[in-house]
Image (cartoon, rainbow, N blue to C red):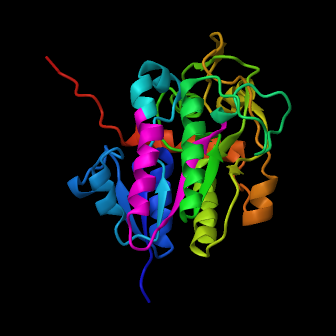
């Protein structure tokens, strides 16, 4: 029996690394593509169409995680954000269409497509009113992905919210920043205590994506799907959780962030109904894992050299 190959773009990302390991454990042949890949054979830009065509060849599907995925990064370099998130998606779709047997494509999107929301939890059919470039680029990438269905390519969209769970994540993202401060016994700085979000552990996200992949492998047509907990957690509550896991960390408020939506909680009903998926890792348990991972990292760090006169 042949082993299905799946190309994962953005394979070195927070979600990509966990998903690649899970796919390999489940018996899939995993092809990786990322600008930051350690191995030259896996390194590359999603905008390089010839390279993407080569890497897709022989794969039954593509999970497109390559993206500028942070609001602030999109505002700092809007051209790179649009080129990666929208033009890169177009490249993936054209490369998939050029294959003798066309692979399915699973596009990772973001809750930023909704913009400022009125009622919570947010369902997948809520209006898209993105309020920043990241949200606009992700909404455009969704439209590109779904439009290719008319050309006979099976596509799907997974909308992610506040994914966390790794010490290798960006250090200034809120969950790892709080967890590291707790592990070090340092100050936990809260920017917008009452802002409320849907924190979903990366291990749960990988399992949800796997469920979507298996549906696509079976030829099922999926609507856009939230991979979220449906549980609101304010930044103040997240800080309190982190402080409770620390040895004496203090919480300090430092203002608020105006770049992104100040609250988001997604409705997970569709994922449960269509995929049989729901998250199993509570934010308390997930932060506990993350704080302990930072503690282990600190314990393994080499001690600074001491010069003795």
Identified at 60% across, 71% down, the residue is 214
Q: Start and end of the magenta stretch?
A: 83-111
Q: Position of residue 19 (x, y in %)?
A: 50, 58
27 drawn magenta: no
Identified at 45% across, 32% down, the residue is 82
Quadrant location, the N terminus: bottom left
> 235 or 74: which is nearer to us?
74
Q: Is residue 24 left or right of residue 283?
A: left
Q: Residue furthest front?
A: 150
Indicate whether 144 appears above or below 194.
below
Splitting the image into 4 quarters, where does residue 100 fall? Answer: bottom left
Identified at 48% across, 71% down, the residue is 25
Q: Is residue 146 left or right of residue 231?
A: left
Q: Position of residue 42 (x, y in %)?
A: 28, 56
> 256 or 301: which is nearer to us?
256
Q: Position of residue 37 (x, y in %)?
A: 30, 49
- The tally of labels here is 0
109 drawn magenta: yes
Quadrant location, the C terminus: top left
Identified at 46% across, 46% down, the residue is 89
Q: Residue furthest left?
A: 309
Q: Position of residue 116 (x, y in %)?
A: 74, 25
Any part of residue 51 in sight: yes
Q: Is residue 6 left or right of residue 125?
A: left
Indicate whether 99 appears above or below 237.
below
Q: Residue furthest top?
A: 255
């Amino acid at each position: 029996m042949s082993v299905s190959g799946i190309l994962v773009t953005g394979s070195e990302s927070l979600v990509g690394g966990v998903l690649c390991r899970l796919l390999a454990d489940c018996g899939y042949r995993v092809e990786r593509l990322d600008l930051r890949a350690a191995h030259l054979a896996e390194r590359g830009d999603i905008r390089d169409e010839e390279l993407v065509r080569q890497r897709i060849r022989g794969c039954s599907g593509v999970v497109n995680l390559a993206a500028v995925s942070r609001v602030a990064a999109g505002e700092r370099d809007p051209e790179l954000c649009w080129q990666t998130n929208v033009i890169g998606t177009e490249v993936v779709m054209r490369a998939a269409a050029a294959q003798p047997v066309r692979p399915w494509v699973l596009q990772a999107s973001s809750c930023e497509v909704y913009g400022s929301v009125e009622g919570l939890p947010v369902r997948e059919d809520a209006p898209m009113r993105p309020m920043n470039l990241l949200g606009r680029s992700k909404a455009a990438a969704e439209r590109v992905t779904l439009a290719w269905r008319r050309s006979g390519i099976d596509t799907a969209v997974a909308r992610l919210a506040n994914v966390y769970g790794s010490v290798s994540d960006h250090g200034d993202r809120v969950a790892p920043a709080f967890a590291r401060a707790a592990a070090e016994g340092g100050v936990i700085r809260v920017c917008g205590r009452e802002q409320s979000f849907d924190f979903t552990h990366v291990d749960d996200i990988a399992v949800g994506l796997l469920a979507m992949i298996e549906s696509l492998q079976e030829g099922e047509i999926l609507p856009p799907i939230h991979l979220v907990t449906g549980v609101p957690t304010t930044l103040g509550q997240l800080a309190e959780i982190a402080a409770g896991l620390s040895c004496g960390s203090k919480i300090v408020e430092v203002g608020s962030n105006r770049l992104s939506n100040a609250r988001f909680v997604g409705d997970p009903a569709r994922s449960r109904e269509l995929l049989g998926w729901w998250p199993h890792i509570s934010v308390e348990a997930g932060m506990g894992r993350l704080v302990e991972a930072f503690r282990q990292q600190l314990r393994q760090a080499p001690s600074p050299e001491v010069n003795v006169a």
